Amino acid sequence: MLTLGAGSLDFRNINGDDSFLVRVSVNRALPRPLRTDRAFLSHAPHHAAAIPDGFQLYIFVGEGGTDPSEVIGSNPTVILPSSFDYLGEADILRISPHRRTVRTLYRNSARFNTVLLTEQCNSYCLMCSQPPKTTDDSWIVDETLRLIPLIDPSAAELCFSGGEPTLLGSGLIRILKSTNALLPNTSVHVLSNGRRFSDLEFAVEYASIGHHDIMVGIPLYSDLSTHHDYVVQADGAFDETIRGILNLKRAKARVELRVVIHKQTYARLPQLAEFIARNLLFVDHVALMGLELTGFTKANLGQLWIDPYDYQQELEAAVAHLARHRMNVSIYNHQLCVLRPSLWEFARQSISDWKNEYIPECQSCSLRTRCGGFFTSGLLKPSEHIHAIADLPPLLGN
Amino acid sequence: MRFEPLERYTKSLEEGYKLLPFLFTALDDKRYVLTNQAGQYAILDRPTLDDFVRHHLPADKSEYSTLKSRHFLLDSDSSVALDLLALKVRTKNALFADFTALHLFVVTLRCEHSCPYCQVSRQNDDKPTFDMSKETADKALALVFKSPSPLIKIEFQGGEPTLNFGLIKYIVEQAETINKVEARDLEFVIATNLALISDEILDFCRAHNVLISTSLDGPADLHNRNRPRPGGDSYQRTIAGISRVRNALGRDRVSAIMTTTEASLGRVKDIIDEYVRLGFGCIFLRPLSPYGFAVKTKSYSAYDVNKWLDFYFQGLDYIIDLNKNGLVFAESYASIILTKIHTPFESGYIDLRSPAGIGLGALVYNYDGDVYASDESRMLAEMGDKTFRLGNVHTYTWEQLITSDALLTPLEESFAGSVPMCSDCAFQPYCGSDPVFHYATQGDYIGHKPSSAFCARNMAIIRRLIGLLEGDEETRRILNRWIRI
Amino acid sequence: MMVTPLEDAAPNDGISAYELRVSSEAFSWVSIKKAAYCFSGRCSFDFQSDGKEIICKLLFPRPQSPKIVASIELAFRNELLDQDLRVRIAEETTPLRNAVLAFAFSKTGIQDQDEI
């Protein structure tokens, strides 16, 4: 049995060099007509008798039981290490024979999936979690258009991100039209800095898709143009973003405002809340988010890092202000123990299931099941005030 | 990977700034209030105000950031302030496009009370001479639905409207029938002294979601003194009535209003305690009404205003204290002003709007079919002055009523943005014009603001509220809870 | 600006007059009249010009104590300064004020990006 190195995967009987997308099934009894464009997935320990025929591709994850070599015959096969244990029904993979890589594009068991549409961006945020690149990655549009039909229509939520997705222009529009047509039950979230929507025509084109359930998530970091432009490292970004928001609203599109809270944005959080409640009262949602310690954040940590415990006063004031004006507010990526109790009702368990992590202090915490825990990256620098919360009276313990 | 420092983005501020339109008025002997067209405010001391106007305010001062964020200045870094200001001004004025929402039907002038401050009722009259007829009601209803307002609130008044309950039933049912096509948000209120409330009336109110508004002037002695009736038991009947209505219709289906008289002035805590005791969530500490007194004696003097302001501020302070001790309770007039300060939404309150609320906000259909621009307009007519009578339901169309000189002239002349003192006053976004009040007390629609009780009262209250908002955090939090959104 | 009682006001006129001088170079007529209007609930005004100065006569129905007159003088002076400031502000901001109103009530409501 070959032991697989970390760098390359074991591909057998796969012809051609081109990447292709494939949907995974663990169902041995899958109706035959459906097998021809699916991959059959077997988790270790593998059983020869349990491998059905007729699939486009066979995937074996992990070692144990029957050796795949003994059963695959001439079938196209990929053998993956146990790090792919998470794979399951309806997941979607990109198989790249020429590079011998397998990339998971979609995980059906996740609460939501994020599809990266481009790494290009017209901003350069200090805390960017996906640092921009200038390479031409327009091939992603085509791949995404091939991905969407494979996504199980029961998917609840799909997120499009980047870079800056609106840089794709008509490519983005095509993708969104496709989700509208092929995923009528799926809620779509587009993360964008909103700047391209300052072009009214583009905003109208976007809204004219008439998508059944879509929202644009747009970051706004300050009530002052200078500070916002500084955080996103782009002159004129504030004005373009606000105009984009106004245009989207004129076109009756749903808009969410996102604020990442860090050392450069926490101090004026109450003023930003006041600004939003006064000027942008019509937005559909305001998301206040903790800092993700990835991408540029690590390089700028000195300017960005502040213990969330230390900005609770500003956060509480901001949330109270927005809530009083009947705006929908959510807090993401904060552990409940560092949030003031008045904020718990706004805290969402937003971290995708497979990323939830906890530290030893969390084991005895009565709110663990309600709390989102940490990003893996967040474990690098958790707040110094993480503490288990003892049993609460029934009113608060929900 | 190169990141620019903040200074790179603040450099353009050195080019200076432009002033955005604003008004300013002294808050106290040290501070000034500035307001913009959207009704946002900022507080500056005089030297800073001077620097600001002379373009000498440095960009690194905290006041600069506040003024920029709240749209008092425009600098070369951002121009979107104008789009946002325009949007806010538009929102603030959007209510006017909806036109008249409140329609008052005076279904009878008959009443068994004989309150000295009432100008309109006719006692002990069983005859229908002073009752509204079905024909008049039909004509009035037709006019009601000519108003484009998505919300239509029909309020029954009198005299004592329950004395003509048959007509109330008729109007409610007719309105509901018409509304099947019109599909407005239809609300009904009966303003009643509750002395004659019955199961029949309550059953009907429950079936048709009719709200009750009653008069409660304070504790028994004060209330009965203000509101005499045969048997001298107005208070007892009111209390019993409130309880009965709550049990029949629901806790929040009955509200109370108080009328302030000379006798009330020393008793504000007692009055508030009465409202608290009865479980109301708020009280409207109303000003002294000039109608009847002023028209007869022409003596509605500033002295009265100061006494009333003492009454009001004592009441406001007391209510704030109650809140600090855990009671959730609001003062309604403050609530209206606070809502104007903190939100772009005009309140529906008729007497504090510019353009004035007469006609545009409310219309009164008297028992005889005469149409008045407001309830005060009707009271003035009962005193013999029909200046604010717009017409009659039997002989005028909606268009004729709404475009009559009797309505348009006072609206235009009293518009706060154009009249002396108001046009310069920073409190303009929070105040209003009241042409009926000024006509009744001073003889013209605009009034002489330096000696106007309306002006004195509102400036004092607005100053006090802004002062409190800028003061201790607990009080600010309490006041912010009173904002109605 | 010193306020001086006018001794030549006839005692049985029932009017007490106090004089206040304002530099006509520093303050415009509009400012002076607007400031006077704010006080017209407390006294009446009469104005005369002698070239460099405007003489404001404050007219009361009966004599006022020096304390009251001094406080009115102070308040009037402050109000004059405020009115002067308002003139300055109006000069600079009236075009923008009208632009905002025009956009607020127009169909599109939002300006063309290039026009400010």
Image: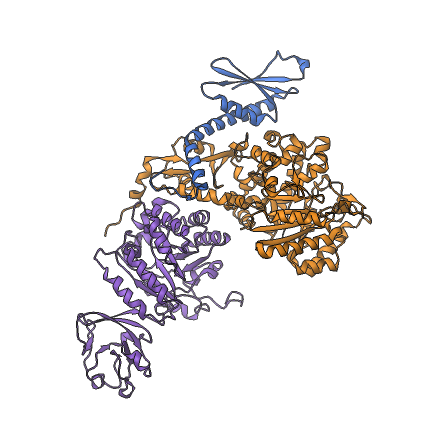
Chain colours: A purple, B orange, C blue
Find residue B427 and report its horizontal and vertical position in percent: 53, 37
Q: Nearer the viewer, residue B356 or A365?
A: B356
Q: Nearer the viewer, residue B126 or C36?
A: B126
Q: Give the residue furthest to the front.
A: B395
Residue depicted at x 44% and y 31% = C89
Find residue C70 and report its horizontal and vertical position in percent: 57, 23
Q: Height in image: A179 above or below A314?
A: below
Find residue A226 and report its horizontal and vertical position in percent: 34, 44
Left or right of B310, for residue B19: left
Whether residue B358 is visible here, answered yes or no, is no
Q: Quadrant of the C terminus of chain C?
A: top left
**Total count of labels:** 0
Left or right of B324, for residue A98: left
Q: Quadrant of residue B294?
A: top right
Q: Nearer the viewer, residue B143 or A279?
A: B143
Q: Quadrant of residue B227?
A: top right
Left or right of B116, for residue A313: left
Find residue B323 and report its horizontal and vertical position in percent: 60, 51
Q: Give the residue furthest to the right.
A: B231
Left or right of B248, for residue A53: left
Q: Height in image: B169 above or below C105?
A: below
Q: Quadrant of residue B412?
A: top right
Q: Give the residue furthest to the top.
A: C8
Whether residue B207 is visible here, answered yes or no, is yes
